[in-house]
Amino acid sequence: MKRPELLCPAKGIEELKTAVIYGADAVYIGGEAFSLRANAKNFTDAEMAEGIAFAHERGAKVYVTANILAHDDDIEKAKGFFEDMRTLGPDGLIIADPGMFTLAGEVCPDIERHISTQANNTNTETFRFWHEMGASRVVAARELTLKELKAIRSGIPASLEMECFVHGAMCISYSGRCLLSNYLAGKDANHGECTHPCRWRYTLQGKKEILEDGGLALEEETRPGEYFPIMENDRGTYIMNSRDLCMIEHIPELIDAGIDSFKVEGRMKTALYVACVARTYRRAIDDFLESEQLYRDNLEWYREEIGKCTTRTFTTGFYFGKPGHDSQIYDSSTYVTEYIYLGHAEEVSEDGSFVLHQKNKFSVGEDIEIMRPSGENTICRVESITGEEGQQMESAPHPGQKLFVRLGEKPSEYDILRKKQRTADEHA
């Protein structure tokens, strides 16, 4: 069986390094322009060069997104962007717009061009079209079933790779092309400015003075007096809030369908999220390729570990047919967060002390967990925290501090430090 690529997201250099260390074969990132995650930190040219070098030294690839739907005003800037890419040398460019695709081929012909899911790739002929135009990979629309993907794979050249999302957030849109943000907030989702109105909380209004026909309308909680007519729906108020996609229990079916690259969504997510997902899918893929029985035996471990990521609970999306009403979350848009990210170990000394650029509060005497790329999780006690000026600290309350930390166990460089979120009962 062909070994599929595990492709993970990175919003910044920390997340890129984490993805590679924790098992990703490739990472996709955004530059400071032409990416659909404008609110992500994204990469400067210098960071991109550093990240590409880091990945290549470890046998991993880096793909850069340029998947906006471009206007004429974007084209001249895009030419300069692709000239920069020619110098930086990523392994591929992820593109949706035909004009951008053509421009990239002219400016940096030696870099692979991948067709983004934003291009609505839903049938064999579309895949063939892009192959004839020079694409080396097409990202399938999320709306396809495994049966449809298998049929497409059998109908396209072996040299054309097929990439599919296997984990992460789902949009209420068609292949990510959403107009809700434009309509409700004046922010263009297809230019990277999505305000995620599908996650907002709405109330139903049905008074005669609001709608002449006496029908129902939505009112969003931060926009009183602004009404959006809808059809009646009695299942709840977060009616567009989808569960997250998770296919960790269906690795055999994904491989059987001939998918070349398993893609994880999440270019806005933390290094902890990236590490959790990369490590779990890496082990699941490798276990299955070694032995299906080994994969089956470890299913509980995969479920447990993937559940430690920040999630909105899980669905299998469209893979096994059209999603039903249970694929939505109607009572809340809040993430389930089981663990708090503290940072990762840097500059580990022989005596076990290390540098930590701290992300969240923790204290001396507290039990935290070392999350290792190998799959091992080690619970240990915080023995000491020292500030940059040598002062001893009982706790580290301010994110961003550079600290010198000693634990009951010695971590290795890039080991993730996290602590379990306390429940309301535990706080009490």
Image: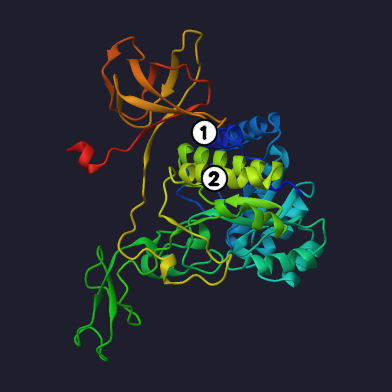
- Residue 8 placement: quadrant: top right
Which residue is found at the position 74% from the left and 70% from the top? Answer: 124
- As drawn, the label of residue 387 is none
Q: Nearer the viewer, residue 178 or 393?
A: 393
Residue at disc 2, secondary structure: loop
Residue visible at 70% across and 33% down in the picture = 56
The mark closer to the camera, 1 or 2, is 1
Q: Considering only vertical position in the picture, is 233 above or below 74?
A: below
Task: Report the quarter where the C terminus lies.
Answer: top left
State the residue in front, 40 or 337: 337
User: Label 2 sits on what residue type?
Assistant: Glu
Residue 28 visible in the displayed image = no
**Mark sitting earlier along the chain (1/2):** 1
* Residue corresponding to mark 2: 32
Badge 1 crowding class, 10 Å Cα cut-off, few under 14, some 14 to 19, many 20 or more, is: some
**Type of colouring:** rainbow
Residue 115 x %, y %: 68, 59
Q: Is residue 242 visible?
A: yes
Q: Hey, what amino acid is under mark 1?
A: Glu
Question: Which x, y percent locates residue 146?
Answer: 64, 65
Q: Secondary structure at mark 1?
A: helix
Which image quarter: residue 75?
A: bottom right
Position in image of residue 357 (x %, y %):
41, 25
Number of the label disc, if any, that sits on residue 14: 1
Q: Residue furthest left?
A: 428
Query: 278 and 306: which one is in front?
Result: 306
> Tags 1 and 2 in contact by the CB under 8 Å rule?
no
Q: Assess disc 2: are there few (<14), some (14-19) or many (≥20) residues with their C-alpha within 10 Å of its C-alpha.
A: some
Is 256 located above or below residue 394 in the figure? Answer: below
Please tell me in which quadrant of the rendered image residue 328 appears.
Answer: bottom left
